Image (spheres, rainbow, N blue to C red):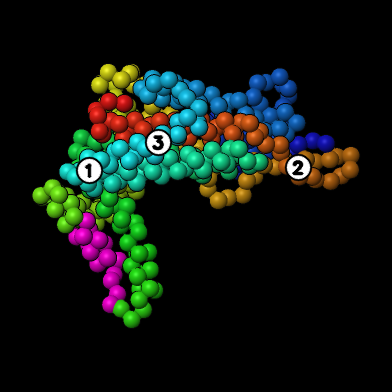
Amino acid sequence: AKTLPPLAHRGPAHPHLPGHGLVGKAFGTAQHDPGAPGQALSCLRASRPLLQFLPLLATQNQRFLGASCRHEQSISGSPHLCNVFMLHYIRTLVPDLVMLALGTDVFECAVAVQDTAGSALPHKGYANARLAFEGAQNLLVLATHEEYEAAGALAWVYFESKDANWRASAEERKNPAGPHLTEGQWLEQRISQIANVWDSNAKGKGRLLLDALARVRGERKKRPDNWLHENMAARQHRAYTVFALSGAGRSLAATAELNEQTYHALCRVTHARPRFDSFAIIRDQARGIIRVDVLPRNFDQARYAVTTCTTLSVREAVAALRWQRTGTV
């Protein structure tokens, strides 16, 4: 039997993307050199080249956040940290609420990854690993932003605006007789309510939400589509630079690139699409048939990848929460 070459319109059959071993091999091809490390042999998935950046990311993380720990240990005290974080919320209510919500999401995703990693399908933990990565990235960016209060207000309005249409429609379904609010009216009402609450504890702070609403509406079509409309990997790198300047460690020059490629790899593996890299097309010349074989999956690699990636995200989330409260990581 002979393995067919990859289809002509496809890219390289073995993309060496970083990102904690997140990307599998495309349609398998037999190799002339069976000793090539980490390359496909007899249609098996390649693995080791995909993990080459994980030790570097872990080293970067440990450099700032202390000695590494197991996934279970990293999430054990995280909910308590969120509770402590909210003890002093009055002046910076809205940005602190954003931090709390993001932190809680990261820690819940970590628990879900832990459960999935111990199952028969550990690679299905990548979706929660991606959510944890995004949450931790946003936490780092917000916690170290040069204008924390204004940035937190902007993030709050941006994320609420993403839900405005759905929430307005839900209210209409709940009360068909009306009156019905448009998407814009619902968002304005919501912002007015929170602005009044913030003002009652810190006079004048509610104005930050109104300014944020004007900015969100004015930049609605601006790209990239995030609450800052900036490259978040570059902002994440800035957070590590801030940590470094505080004496917490030395920032790696490749931080932004590594995290951007990690995110792209996570996006690729979590999108709904046909998983063509799970199969090999075999031409059986002796029998004159084409056979499709399911490629063996490296579950140990997937388990290591999702837990290690998520552990790094949890540690970043903890560092962001601590930084905003204490100025240390």
SS class, disc 3: helix
Q: Kindly identify the amino acid type of the residue bearing the numbered disc 3.
A: Ser
Question: The residue under label 1 is which amino acid type?
Answer: Tyr
Q: Position of residue 286 (x, y in %)?
A: 89, 39
Q: Tell me the CA gap for discs 1 and 3.
A: 18 Å
Please identify the residue farthest to the right as the structure is shown: 286
Using the image, tell me which numbered label, if any, was put on residue 205: none
Q: Does the rendering let one see residue 49? A: yes
Image quarter (top left, top right, bottom left or bottom right) of the C terminus: top left
Image position, residue 203 (x, y; %) = 10, 49
Q: Where, quadrant-wise, is the N terminus in this rendering?
A: top right
Query: Residue 13: x and y, percent?
Result: 62, 35
With respect to residue 28, does 95 lie above or below?
A: below
- Kind of residue sitting beneath label 2: Asp
Q: Is residue 328 left or right of residue 46?
A: left
For disc 3, the marked residue is: 78
Q: Is residue 130 visible?
A: no
Return the residue at label 1.
89
Find disc 2 in the rendering and name its residue.
Answer: 293
Dividing the picture into quarters, in which one does residue 298 lie? Answer: top right
Sequence-wise first label, 1 or 3: 3
**Residue at the image point whose x is 19% and y is 60% from the top:** 192
Can you tell which quarter of the image residue 253 is in?
top left
User: Dot 3 surroundings within 10 Å: few (below 14), some, or many (20 or more)?
Assistant: some
The part of the chain drawn in magenta is 179-194
Secondary structure that dominates the magenta span:
helix
Q: Is residue 37 left or right of residue 68?
A: right
Front position in the image: 279 or 199: 199
What residue is shown at x 21% (from left), y 60% (from top)?
193
Q: Secondary structure at mark 2?
A: strand
| Residue at the spot 80% in from the left edge and 45% down from the top edge | 290
